[in-house]
Image (tube, grey):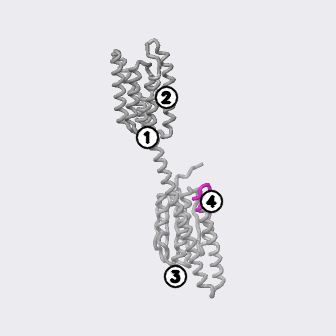
Amino acid sequence: MRWKSGFDPYLALIVAVAQLVIAQGATWGQQRLLREPLDPYAYALLLVGPLTILFRRRFPLLTVSVALAAMDLFLIGGYAYGPAFLSPGVLLFLLVTGGRRLMAWTMATMTVASLLSYAWWVGNRDLFHSVAILAFILLFMVVAELVRIVRERQAERERVAEEEARRQASEERLTMAQELHDVLAHNISLIHVQASTALHLIDANPEQARSALATIKTASKEVLGEMRSVLNVLREGAPRSPTAGLDRLDDLVQRSGMEVSLRRVGSRPLPPQVERAAYRIVQESLTNAARHAPGSRVSVRLEYGAEELAIVVADTGATKPAVLSEEGSGNGIPGMRERASALGGTLVAGPSGGGFQVEARLPLPEENPT
């Protein structure tokens, strides 16, 4: 993360005030060193550094050079040590954290050279003093590098988090699309089959035709309700209705318009994603049976094991004229297989005897004894 450009004027003002205040204290504290008192020329040099901060983005190298020149002139003028160091330090720090590391380290080397040159010029050739200057600037640059690394890592974490959020949003949209497909495919296919039955029998068997129309009414109401439930999830702040689960399996069987036997072997709590996938697999299997094997008897078996949920949906084959069914989109079995694979399970579908069978196995987590 970098400093925003709108903060530069405030930073320049803060540095200017700090340098002026520090200069007053340093001048008073260094009277015994016979440093020159502050005059208009000294104040002007103290303001040059903060002013360069305003132009650091357009002229990074020039602004640091000007700030260093103002510092050198302040020292050469015999004024107090300390206050003029602040502006070059801030600019070097901003260069490092802004990613201009080569330029920053080059200018830091120039700073060391200028300070050591001034010390030798005034006759201070103490080796300890020179090492102290070098160590201080090196420590300052290392701290700036550490701040840069921390910010870059934070920015990387934020970027990864944003990408993960986008990925999850994309997966949620894909899940919603799959839910809508399953809801529409099942109910529209059921409506189609029952409408075909009603048209076929409306003259010969009005009672059976009336039953088919009643099923159409129920299915159309159900599809509207499920679509509303799925679409509500997409609306921010909308109430989230419960998704399709195995507790609604009996109602699904009753609305299928076929002779369906449902059997459950065992019982245990299931994760929501497994329960939703199991419901949709049964729903799609019944849809395929109604579309391709009208009049058949269908058996649905759910076996709750310790490690997996086994789902078997089998029909006995068509017993009514095929005119009541039409070819579907061809996405039913691949969609069921994708649901099973997404959970680490398997799904096998194919002819069985005179009919068709779908067998899915969905892995389950280890059951909590509590």
Question: Which one is in front in this view, the residue at disc 2 or the one at disc 3?
Answer: 2
Of residues 190 and 136, which is closer to you in this image? 136
Q: Write down the residue under mark 4.
A: 241
Question: Which one is in front in this view, the residue at disc 4 or the one at disc 1?
Answer: 1
Look at the picture and state if 356 lies above or below 346: below
Q: Residues within 10 Å of mark 3 (few under 14, many from 20)?
A: few
Q: Is residue 258 visible?
A: no
Q: Write down the residue under mark 1.
A: 152
Looking at the image, tell me whether mark 1 or mark 2 is earlier in sequence order.
Answer: 2
Looking at the image, tell me whether mark 2 or mark 3 is earlier in sequence order.
Answer: 2
Magenta extent: 231-247
- Cα distance in 3D space between marks 3 and 1: 66 Å
Q: Amino acid at mark 1?
A: Glu
Q: Write down the residue under mark 2.
A: 16
The local secondary structure at tag 1 comes to helix
Q: Amino acid at mark 2?
A: Ala
Image marks 4 and 3: residues in contact by CB distance under 8 Å: no
